[in-house]
Image: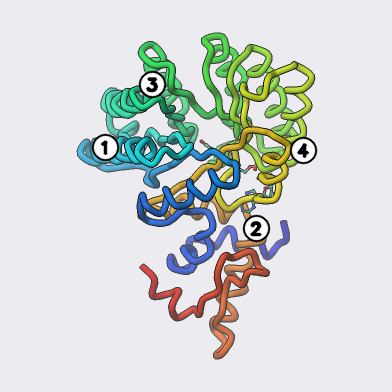
Amino acid sequence: MSFLDHLIVRTLPLVPKPVVGRFSRRYIAGPTLEDAMRVVRELNAQGAMATIDVLGEEIENREQAIAYASQYISVLDEIARLRVDSNISVKPTALGLKLDRDLCHEQIARVVARARDLESFVRLDMEDSSCTSDTIEIHNRLKRDFTNVGLAIQAYLRRSWPDVRSLAAAGANFRLCKGIYVEPRRIAFKDPLIIRKNYRRLLEEMLSRGCYVGIATHDESLVWEGIRLTETLGIPRDRFEFQMLLGVEEELRRILIDAGYRLRVYVPYGKEWYAYSVRRLKENPALAGQVFRSLVRGLVPGQARIGSAAEGGRHEAPIDKIVRRP
Ligand code: FDA
């Protein structure tokens, strides 16, 4: 990452929200459930499955937790009604994890029960390390009553090895990702090479214990490891899937689908797009650089266009329209 890109990432909080919105459009289906369904249909037509995330994180009261759970139930109903190939991903903090763990368990259980009735599946996203133990605890409680629930594990966490060993022994259904939150070194590995090695080690443990795994990465060396490990261990292709985020590495996605692998795309939608967008932009330093360059160009009269297709944006729009968008 160049010095300029580092600088942009650090100053992202200063970038006007509408500009962040403009650049993160590729990562988000749109504000409504209809937008999510349109994108899921497009993905299904391309041979990909989906998992829908209703954007939103920490909430302030019980009513919001209950409302989020109800929104997820509507998503499940719509998936069933339209017969699209998608399940859902849930952020426990949006369902009250930081307010009251029992409330959170209760609300996720409502969602998982509906998913069970509709023969669908619920994945618990893994948030920052202050949520790890509670998320695993809620997952384990849910597993007593349901089979259609799984969780995400982050390869950057030092604790993930013992966590995976005990979860795998109980037959958990995993998503394995590197991990995105900023954590202190005593909690998380910082060296990208060690994170990769840990990813491989965890993946091997999950697969060799017979667990279903969503191999969630755009890192081609890890995709290669996933293919190598599943071949070496003789894991059938219906016992794992690759997972990618909407708007990221579409070419690699295509390559895997064409090679006959199961592939699921994470499709976020909703009005609470900002926190998710900033995380994605921080992972894409090239795009963060584009934000800066566009802002500079926006200061020069007649140079106010941003996000050309060549820069990786989906559309091109004059900056005056962009800054007025809600
Ligand atoms: P890496 O970051 O090295 O990216 C590999 C390559 O992919 C990059 O070189 C670049 O080309 C491309 N790329 C990656 N991100 C990009 C972006 N935003 N824009 C453009 N290009 C990009 N994390 C977490 O903490 N909890 C969770 O529950 C989840 N859930 C989740 C679900 C799914 C389906 C995925 C794919 C990822 C997650 N994550 C997550 C995020 C994950 O932890 C991680 O931050 C990202 O996947 C990026 O890591 P990679 O393994 O892709 O490697």
Number of other residues with Cα within 10 Å of mark 1, as a class: few under 14, some 14 to 19, many 20 or more: some
Mark 2–mark 4 Cα distance, whole angstroms, equals 19 Å
Q: Amino acid at mark 3?
A: Ile
Q: Amino acid at mark 2?
A: Pro
Residue 241 in which image quadrant: top right
Q: Position of residue 233 (x, y in %)?
A: 75, 16
Sequence-first tag of 1 and 3: 1
Of the pair 228 and 14, the residue shown nearer to us: 228
Q: Which residue is most to the bottom? A: 301
- Residue 221 has which mark? 4
**Which residue lies at the image location 67% right of the left edge and 61% below the top edge?**
286
Q: Is residue 204 left or right of residue 324?
A: right
Q: Amino acid at mark 4?
A: Ser
Sequence-first tag of 2 and 4: 4
State the residue position of label 1. 70
Q: Amino acid at mark 1?
A: Ser
Q: Position of residue 181 (x, y in %)?
A: 53, 41
Secondary structure of the residue carrying numbered label 4? helix
